[in-house]
Image: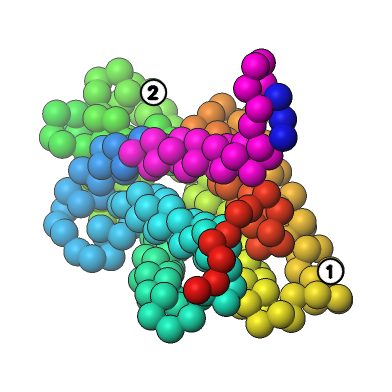
Amino acid sequence: MIRIGSLQVSKVALVHGLKYLIYLLLAIDAWQYFQADLAASRQILGEGFSYEKFVESFAITIDVTAWLVLLLCFEVETAWLAPERVRGWIAWLLHGIRAVCYFFVLSSYYGYIAKYLMLTHTVPLPVSDVCDLVGRGYTWLSALDEYPPLTAEACQRLRDSSPVMVEGTRIVADPARLADARFMAWIDVLYATAWLAVVAVLELDVYLKEHGRLQGWILTASELVKAVLYLGLLAGAVYWGMEGEFLDFWDSFLWLAAFVLIDLDVFGVGTERQPAA
């Protein structure tokens, strides 16, 4: 028990309270990402709707929502239920939900790749002077996923930078900002790849734990791989923080904390599972 003022709180209660606070904060972040994706989608979908463009536009929202559901599935399987209870229809239900989530996670992963590829394809402006596009529904690339309307002030800044247009869109970009956006998009791809690796190892951990085989060198190898992946993800979060992307830094930190706590659940640290029926 841990004493807080005049109250005595168990370590299990503190762990659960911390986890659910993190889940709530992640849900709030998901809403903020949806709002950002919605604003950016008006430009990407401006030339017509398609499934590929939809996934590209809402890649972050789809990704975060699917990961939240995955996180809750892992929470149920590792903290709420003992391994011997994950059988029959319960196992089929949890695995089915996770399969659907993985479909959307991989779809959003495709979206990250598509967004990067979109930024690698440019065409010349349809006019000789970029300022002729002001008031005609064009936007300009301020940063990755940020496409404010092309104004007279913005066109003056773009005029001397040999701007181009992102192919298939009405987005005007100067080469320097476009290169920065491509780099950040590539970081997103690498980051998403690392998270896929984390969840693949965690899935393997849960499977081996349920079959009593998560021990010895397998356990050591799993923890080493996850440690390397977590350090890489933490480095990415710190990088975003240094770049002034506080939401990305905060979101990454929350996800790391959530998965570390799930990792503790896998080994029964700070959990109170329901007894087997």
Q: Which residue is drawn at 43% across and 53% down?
A: 68
Q: Is 16 in front, or is 7?
A: 7
| Residue where numbered disc 1 is placed | 220
Q: In which quarter of the image is residue 5?
A: top right
**Magenta stretch contains residue 6:** yes
- SS for tag 1? helix
Q: In which quarter of the image is residue 168?
A: bottom left
Q: Can residue 267 be seen in this view?
A: yes
Q: In which quarter of the image is residue 131?
A: top left
Around disc 2, counting alpha carbons within 10 Å, would you say few (fewer than 14), some (14 to 19), or many (20 or more)?
Answer: few
Instruction: Give me the disc on residue 157.
Output: 2
Q: Quadrant of the N terminus?
A: top right
Q: How many labels does the image show?
A: 2
Q: Is 204 in front, or is 138?
A: 204
Question: Which stretch did the figure color magenta?
Answer: 4-31
Q: Distance between the residues labelled 2 and 1?
A: 55 Å
